[in-house]
Structures are given as structure tokens and as C-alpha cells.
Image (cartoon, grey):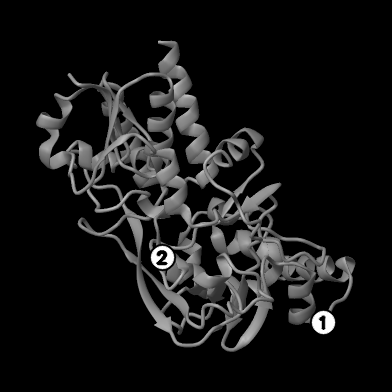
Amino acid sequence: MRYDYLIVGAGLYGAVFAREMTDMGKHVLVIDKRDHIGGNVYTEDTYGIHVHKYGAHIFHTDNQRVWEYVNRFAVFNGFINSPVANYKGEIYPLPFNMYTFNKMWGVTTSEEAAAKISEQRKEAGIIEPKNLEEQAISLVGSDIFEKLIKGYTEKQWGRNCKDLPAFIIKRLPVRFTFDNNYFNALYQGIPKGGYTKLVENLLDGIEVRLNTDYLDNKAELDALAQKVVYTGPIDAYFGYKLGTLEYRSVRFETEVLDIPNFQGNAVVNHTDRETPFTRIIEHKWFEFGKDDLGRDIPKTVVSKEYSYEWKQGDEPYYPINDEKNQDLYLKYKKLAEGEGNVIFGGRLGEYKYYDMDAVIEAALDVCSKELKK
């Protein structure tokens, strides 16, 4: 065996694990079935604009350990996510805050806004929310639910809001202040030079093989290392023998436009049900200040996002963590625990939606445990 660890997947989890183990004197090999590193945080340079090829990724964390860690490998630009919602041509600020409430109801104080939400919650007869629709109305009232949540959410998940669990929206930011900062996190930003540069720096000096499918060459690759770190789909590892875990996937329509500014914001959600896409990303604004229209870059790149039901062969994005899928995942997890020389990690290996900082923290924690063995 030539390596201590074979790391399947060159995304954040795999790259952090590889960096840590290499720095501790271990020999690692990183493989990925794609033709690039970075996993879903991969960015591609297009006319000097770093395009998020697999959807927008905005780094945010309260974890000082993780923030200090990523700053070893990239300089972050301090980008603050302030999306807006477009409902049939009406523009509303996100997250839901006093600007939103003023536009929706004409209220000017937090007391007026809270009273309006309380009134609409009572009208809906909600005491203990049982599904996403009831949870949303209890948080922001029926007007905001109908215009800014219902259509977007049903496009995103392909299900009626009454059929979705309440926990999906429990983290919805609602503020009774004039604050358009979507995340509450202490540290926020986008790596200057794009996420690909960040992952390149993590993998500096480490052997990486691209266009290499682990499951198609499992026996041969397993023979190279004492242990495997697997970040692919857990059900695929076991040949789907217990059934297939469900996901939502996303299709992107990306265009280069010969204008310096298309929508004036990085993220615009289209919340009416009739518009087929969920949002438009204008990649330029992740890196350039809004007061600078990219004078040296007279073009812009925009991506429309269309959510759809995943099928095998598509890219899995969002785990559908309902009761049925969680029960199936736990069965696969039990099988995984029997694979003594395999570590299952990341959003696909653990079948969970991971923010980037949580992925990095999880990888660091597993490395610490490994080094203590």
C-alpha cells in the first residue's frame, strides 16, 4: 500500500482532510471523478469574473477556529449577502426585516410590524405549526408567505408547502430592524480569486488524480491505501441495495451578457410560482463592490436556477430529509459503521445539508480523532 489515505472527492471535506493529514506526515492520494477540483464550490474564470458553476456559495461562520483556518489559504473580501425578492415585478428586501414590512404593509415601527404578523397568525388559527406553511405564517404572516415564500419554496422542493416539514424554514431570518444582511454570522465573505483558488491552496503539493471514478475502480483503488475517506453518496457506495436516497437537483442556464450590470445584485429570488426558475445569480457582484460596475469588465455573467427532482446520473444537491429518507439513511449509516477502514464524510457521505464552515469543522474534527488512534 502506497498511501495512508485514499480520499474520494476533491471538495472542501476531502481537501481539508488531505491538507491536515499531509501536514502530519501522512501520505494521501486525492481522487475525483470530475475534471476539476473543488467539488460544488468550484469557480471558473470567465472574462475575469469568478463564476460559481454549481450555484452560489457565500462563506459565513461564527466559528473563529474555522475562520482562522480558511484565512490561511485565501483572502476573503468581506462580501455581505443582501438578496432581494422579485414578486411579479415588485421588489422586496431579504431577509425579512423592517424594509420588507414597510414595503408590504406601510408600517414604520417594529411594534406595528409585530402586531401585523400576530394578527395574521391568529387569523390563520396557528398555535403549534405542523408544516412549513404554518411555520412560515407564524413567523412572518400570511401576506409575506403568499408573496415571498410559497411560490419559491414549492419550486425549490417540488412539493406543496403543507407537505413539507416545518423545520426546513425554522432558521428563516426575521428581523425587526432595518438590516439587509442575510446571515447573522460574525465572519462573512468570498475568497478573492474564487473558491477554486482556495481549494488549490489546500491541495498544494498533494497528489490529485481527476477523471477517476472510485466506484468503477474500487478494488484497484482500495488496494493503494490503508484507509479510505469517502465523500460520495452513501447509498451509491453500497450499490443502492437498500434503496435510493432522494435529493433535489438544480439546472443552471448561464449567459455572458455584453453589458456591465444586469440586475445590480448578486442574488435575486423570483418568488412567484409562474416564473419557472427560482433565482438569478449575477456572479460579478460576489467580488466587485456594488458602487463599481466593473469598469474594467464590460461584461457580466448571470445564471438562472431551475430546481427539479433528482434521478441517478444527475448531480444531487439538497437531501430530502423527510422521515422516509432519514430512516433509509440510518440503515445505510449502520452498514457504513461496519466498514472499518472507510470514513464517510461530507454532505453526500452523511446525507445532510452542510454549510461550508460546518463541512470544514467536521473534517478537522475527524482528522483529530484519526491522529489520536
In the rendered image, residue 26, in percent from the top left (x then y), is placed at: 34, 20
Which residue is rendered at x = 54% and y = 77% of the image?
Answer: 271
Q: Please give left or right for residue 372 compared with residue 88 in the image.
A: left
Name which of mark 1 and mark 2 comes first in the sequence. Answer: 2
**Position of 329 compared to 97: left or right?**
left
Residue found at x 50% / y 54%? 165
Look at the picture and state if 235 lies above or below 292: above
Q: Is residue 211 left or right of residue 337?
A: left
Residue farthest to the top? 373
Q: Secondary structure at mark 1?
A: loop
Query: CB under 8 Å between callouts 1 and 2?
Result: no
Q: Quadrant of residue 343?
A: top left
Q: Which mark is residue 45?
A: 2
* Quarter assignment of residue 29: top left
Q: How many marks?
A: 2
Q: Amino acid at mark 1?
A: Gly
Residue 45 screen position, x and y as percent? 41, 65
Looking at the image, residue 167 sits to the left or right of residue 124; the answer is left
Using a 10 Å C-alpha cutoff, classify the residue at mark 1 as few (fewer than 14 neighbours), some (14 to 19) or many (20 or more).
Answer: few
Distance from Cα at disc 1 to Cα at disc 2:
43 Å
- Dot label at residue 130: none
| SS type, badge 2 | strand
Where residue 163 sits: x, y (%)? Answer: 45, 61
Which of the numbered marks, if any, corresponds to residue 106? 1
Q: Residues within 10 Å of mark 2 (few under 14, many from 20)?
A: few
Q: Is residue 352 above or below residue 121?
A: above
Choose between 225 and 330: the one closer to the eye.
225
